[in-house]
Amino acid sequence: MSMKKIAAFLKDDFTKKEIALIIITAIAMTLVIGRYLEPRVIVIPTPKEIILQVAPSETQSNLSYYYMLRPGAQEVINNRLFGSVAYSINSDGLRASQNYSREKPDSTFRIALFGDSYTFGQFLNANDTMADVLQGKLNLLNCTKKVETLNFGVPGYDFPYSVELFLGKGRYYNPDISIFSIKNDDIDIINEIQTPMLAAYSKARPAAGQDSETAIVTAEQAMQEYFTTIKDYNKTIWLGEYAEKPLKAIAAGAPGSELVIFSYFNAKQYDDFLRNRSSALGLRFVSMDDHDAQYRSRWNAEFSILPSHDRHPNAKGNQYLADFLQSYLTANGLVPCS
C-alpha cells in the first residue's frame, strides 16, 4: 500500500462508537503481534472496559486514535490460567489503587514509568507489576527520601503514545526520573497507521468488541495487511517520524529531570539509533542486551506469562525487570539510595 493510501486511511471519518470499537480491537492486536515478531500464538483476553478514547484536539500531538486508561475504572478478569486479576485505575487514569498529588512532597523521590502492557502489568495484580516491585525494592535500601513509583503503562501503546501521555499528564507529577520502556513491537507497530486498518475488519465483525476469539481473528487479518503495508516503508522516514520526533519532544518537555530510554527485545539497528539519538539529545539510554546476553533465551522458559504462547512478563519476569532497573538506577547514582 502506498503512503497516499495510508494517508487516506488516516483521514477517514469514523463515528465515536466505531473509533471505540477500533481501539478495543487494536488492544486485541497486541495478542497476535507475536505471530509476526516472534513465533508465538497468543489467546488471552485483554482489558477493554478501562479504555477511554481521546479526541485529537485534546492531544499534544494531534493524534487521531489516542486513548488513555479510564479514570476510576475497575475490572476483574477471571481466567482459568491466572485466576482472578484486578485492574484498578485511579482518579487520574494511572494503574493504582490510590491517588497521587501532582504536587510532589519534599520528602518524596518520584519515578514515573511509561510503556505498554508490559509496564501496565497485563494479567497481573498490581503488587506484581514492575512499578510496584521496583518501589518496594528501592525503599528497602538506605534512601534519604521515600521512593514513589507511578505506573503510566497502557496496553497497546507505542512510543509516540507513551510520549503523549508524558507530555499531557506525566510531567505534571514532577517526576525526578521518567523511564520510557521501548521494545520491538513499540517500534514496529505504529498505532496511527495500524489502528485505522482495523476499521474494515471491525465493522465486518461487530462481535469483535465483545468476543475475544473474534477479536483475535479480526486483529490477525488486519495485522497481515499492516505488515504487508509497511514492508516497503522507508525505515529512515519511519524512525524519523515515530522515534526522532518523540525523543525530541520528551527532551524539550522536561528540562532538568532525568529521562531514561529503557530498551529490550530490540534489533541492534534500533538500539544503535536510540542510543545515538538519546546521547545527542541529553537523554540516558540503557539496553538489556548490553547487560545480560542471556535474557532473551531465558525469557520464554522463566519470565513469560504463558511459555511458548505469550511473552508478557509473569511475576518473576517483573521481578527481573525491577531488579535490572534497581541496579541501573543505583549504580548510576540516579536515586537517593545506597
Image (spheres, helix red, strand yellow):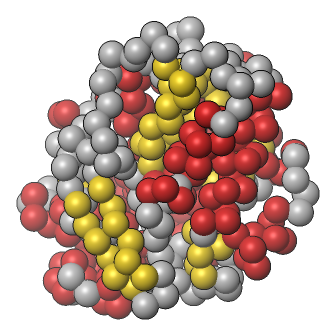
Q: In the image, is residue 22 above or below residue 211?
A: above
Quadrant of the image for the C terminus? top right
- Foreground pick, 309 / 227: 309
In the rendered view, does 198 fall on the left or right side of 14? right
Rendered image quadrant of residue 78: bottom left
Rendered image quadrant of residue 248: top right
Quadrant of the image for the N terminus? bottom left
Residue sitting at 59 percent across and 42 percent down? 136
Residue sitting at 67 percent across and 85 percent down? 308
- Foreground pick, 171 / 65: 171
Residue sitting at 87 percent across and 53 percent down? 292
Q: Position of residue 206 (x, y in %)?
A: 16, 83
Residue 224 shows in the view: no
In the rendered view, does 334 fall on the left or right side of 43? right
Count the marks: how many? 0
Residue 105 shows in the view: yes
Residue sitting at 53 percent across and 10 percent down? 255
Q: In the image, is residue 210 above or below residue 323?
A: below
Q: Position of residue 118 (x, y in %)?
A: 54, 58
Q: In the image, is residue 180 above or below residue 72?
A: above
- Foreground pick, 281 / 100: 100
In the rendered view, does 79 fall on the left or right side of 15? right
In the rendered view, does 30 fall on the left or right side of 261? left
Rendered image quadrant of residue 243: top right
Q: Position of residue 85 (x, y in %)?
A: 38, 71
Q: Position of residue 323 (x, y in %)?
A: 73, 48
